[in-house]
C-alpha cells in the first residue's frame, strides 16, 4: 500500500464531477487500499478519490457508528438519499466540519441527519446502509467530493467569507498544491 498526497482546494479534480467506475479489477482494489492507508495516516473520517487526484466515484470511510454499518468501508459509484436539511443556522459548537483538502480549517455546516447510501465494494458487490447523526455527515461530506463540491461550497455566507479569506491567506485556489500525510504536520493537530 502507498500513502498518497492529498490535494488542496483549487486542484481542478476537486471541483468537477468524478467519473463512474466501470472496471472492478486489481488496479481498483489497489487504489482503494492506498486510499485506506492515506486516510488512516491523515487521521481522516473519510477520503474521496478526487482528494488524491483521481477523478473516480470512490470514497472510503472510517467511523465507528451505531447504525449497524461496518466501522470502515468503501463505496464505489454511490447513490445517496437524504432526509431534509433543516433551515436553521448551523450550531457553531456542535456542527463544525473540517476537510483534508481544506486543511486545518473548520466551519459550521448544517447537514441532513439521515442518509441512505447504495453502491459497490471493490469487487463490484452491492453495499447498502443507513447512517445517522455524525456518520451521516461523514457520508454526505465524502459523497459531495464526487460531485466536485467541498463542504466550504455549502457554507452560509458568514462562514463562506471566512473560508475564502483563509484560502487566500494560505495561497490555495491554484493547481498543484498538496500535503503529505505522515510527512507534513497534521493540519488538524492529531
Image (cartoon, rainbow, N blue to C red):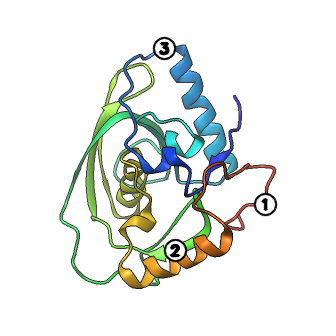
The reply, left or right, for residue 175 in relation to residue 58 is: right
Q: Earlier in the sequence, mark 2 or mark 1?
A: 2
Name the element at disc 2. helix
**Secondary structure at numbered mark 1:** loop
Q: Examine the rendered structure and indicate whether residue 115 appears above or below residue 84.
A: above
Q: Residue 160 in the image: x percent, y percent?
A: 44, 77
In depth, the one of 152 and 64 nearer the eye is: 152
| In the image, residue 49 above or below residue 66 | above
Q: Decide if residue 29 is in sight here.
A: yes
> Mark 3 packing: few (<14 Cα in 10 Å), some, or many (20+)?
few
Residue at (44% x, 59% y) in the render: 150
Q: Earlier in the sequence, mark 1 or mark 3?
A: 3
Report the Cα–Cα distance between label 2 and label 3.
Answer: 39 Å
Real-space CA distance between mark 2 and mark 1, rounded to the nearest whole angstrom: 22 Å
The answer to which quarter of the image holds residue 146 is: top left
Q: Which residue corresponds to mark 3?
A: 25
Residue at 59% x, 38% y is 36
Q: Is residue 83 left or right of residue 74?
A: left
- Give how far apart the Cα atoms at labels 1 and 3 are: 34 Å
Q: Position of residue 89 (x, y in %)?
A: 31, 84
Quarter placement of the N terminus:
top right
Residue 86 position by quadrant: bottom left
Residue 185: assigned label: 1
Q: Nearer the viewer, residue 119 or 178?
A: 178
Q: Nearer the viewer, residue 188 or 7?
A: 7
Mark 3, secondary structure of its residue: loop
Residue drawn at 23 percent across, 68 percent down: 85
Q: Which residue is mark 2?
A: 164
The residue positioned 38% from the left and 60% from the top of the image is 137
Indicate the position of residue 34 as horizontal and vertical percent values. 63, 32
Amino acid at each position: 500500500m502507498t500513502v498518497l498526497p492529498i490535494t488542496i482546494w483549487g486542484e481542478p479534480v476537486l471541483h468537477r464531477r468524478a467519473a463512474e467506475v466501470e472496471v472492478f479489477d486489481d488496479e481498483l482494489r489497489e487504489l482503494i487500499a492506498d486510499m485506506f492507508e492515506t486516510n488512516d495516516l491523515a487521521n481522516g473520517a473519510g477520503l474521496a478519490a478526487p482528494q488524491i487526484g483521481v477523478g473516480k466515484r470512490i470514497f472510503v470511510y472510517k467511523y465507528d457508528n451505531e447504525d449497524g454499518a461496518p466501522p470502515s468501508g468503501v463505496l464505489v459509484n454511490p447513490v445517496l438519499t437524504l432526509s431534509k436539511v433543516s433551515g436553521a443556522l448551523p450550531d457553531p459548537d456542535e456542527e463544525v466540519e473540517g476537510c483534508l483538502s481544506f486543511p486545518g480549517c473548520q466551519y459550521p455546516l448544517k447537514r441532513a441527519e439521515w442518509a441512505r447510501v447504495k453502491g459497490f465494494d471493490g469487487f463490484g458487490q452491492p453495499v447498502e446502509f443507513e447512517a445517522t447523526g455524525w456518520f451521516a455527515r461523514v457520508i454526505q461530506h465524502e459523497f459531495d467530493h464526487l460531485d466536485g463540491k467541498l463542504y466550504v461550497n455549502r457554507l452560509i455566507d458568514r462562514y463562506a467569507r471566512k473560508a475564502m479569506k483563509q484560502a487566500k491567506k494560505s495561497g490555495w485556489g491554484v493547481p498543484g498544491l498538496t500535503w503529505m500525510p505522515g510527512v507534513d504536520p497534521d493540519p488538524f493537530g492529531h
